[in-house]
Amino acid sequence: MLQKLISPFKEFGSFGGAQYLIDRALSSISPNLRLFSYDLMVQPISDKPLLPVSLTKFLDLREIKRGDSELGLMPVPAEIIEFRFKQKALCLGLFQKGKFVGYMWFCFEVYVEDEVRCTYLLNPKQKSVFDFDLYLFPEHRLGLGFLGLWAGANKFLVKRGIHYSFSRLTRFNLASRKAHDHLGWKQVGQAYFLKMWCVECMISTISPYIGVSLRNSGRNRLELCPDALLQT
């Protein structure tokens, strides 16, 4: 028991470990009690190749649309997928020699979060996207899947005039943080959401800093700007 209490502090630090234990304690009482801790990130979209051509010749990236069979292979509830399409989200799937390797989703200008009641406004909106739910099937996580997916996504987004991709990262997803580090991403803010059944309370480092949502029509709103990149 003592080891279980100490382990989160070793892995996530004192502040992160405390958040992790609070969330676990709340969720053990009810699935409608949660503490979500997000780092808000941005990374540049570059036209420079992430992989040599020799390593990408068997990789193919294509858009997955409503009704495609690949949607049924995703570990995502059908209602969440439909929610994404209704907000005009776009899904890119990576295939290696015809086999479905993984996927990622993008929203343009605005992203309506499906985990908490928060809407992210992107600035500059014509040059930005919000990426979310990057997923690689387990048997492909040790290969070129991650870089292959981003290599193809960069090409796709550059053609659309996109310069920045925003995302939100849970404080406890260390694997994703490590994988993205060399892509040049930076933190632009933090946000914490305490979910108590129908009530959600937000504290953020981004204006309006504090918010309370009592229903879906009263969502919190945060505007994301790539200040961390513009200053480097």
Image: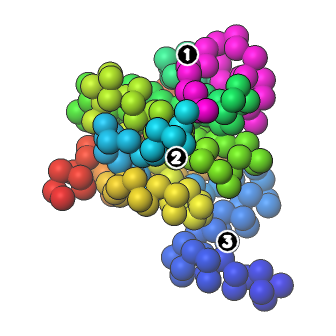
Q: Which residues are magenta?
A: 58-82
Residue assigned mark 3: 21
Looking at the image, tell me whether mark 2 or mark 1 is earlier in sequence order.
Answer: 1
Q: Amino acid at mark 3?
A: Leu
Tell me: residue 118, above or below residue 180.
Answer: above
Q: CA distance from mark 1 to mark 3?
A: 35 Å
Residue 209, magenta (yes or no)? no
Looking at the image, tell me whether mark 3 or mark 2 is earlier in sequence order.
Answer: 3
**Residue 143 visible in the displayed image:** yes
Q: Which residue is drawn at the image coordinates 43% and 60% (left, top)?
A: 181
Between 206 and 64, the residue placed more toward the observer is 64
79 lies left or right of 65? right
Residue assigned mark 2: 147
Please identify the residue farthest to the left as the structure is shown. 231
Q: CA distance from mark 3 to mark 2?
A: 33 Å
- Discs 3, 2 touching: Cβ within 8 Å: no
Corner quadrant of residue 109: top left
The nearer-to-camera label among 2 and 1 is: 2
Looking at the image, tell me whether mark 1 or mark 3 is earlier in sequence order.
Answer: 3
Q: Amino acid at mark 1?
A: Lys
Location of the N terminus by quadrant is bottom right
The nearer-to-camera label among 3 and 2 is: 2
**Residue 132 visible in the displayed image:** no
Q: Which residue is drawn at the image coordinates 61% and 19% (left, top)?
A: 64
SS of the residue at dot 2? helix
107 lies left or right of 27? left
Q: CA distance from mark 2 to mark 1?
A: 28 Å
Between 29 and 79, the residue placed more toward the observer is 79
Q: Residues within 10 Å of mark 2 (few under 14, many from 20)?
A: some
Q: Residues within 10 Å of mark 3 (few under 14, many from 20)?
A: some
SS of the residue at dot 3? helix
Residue assigned mark 1: 86
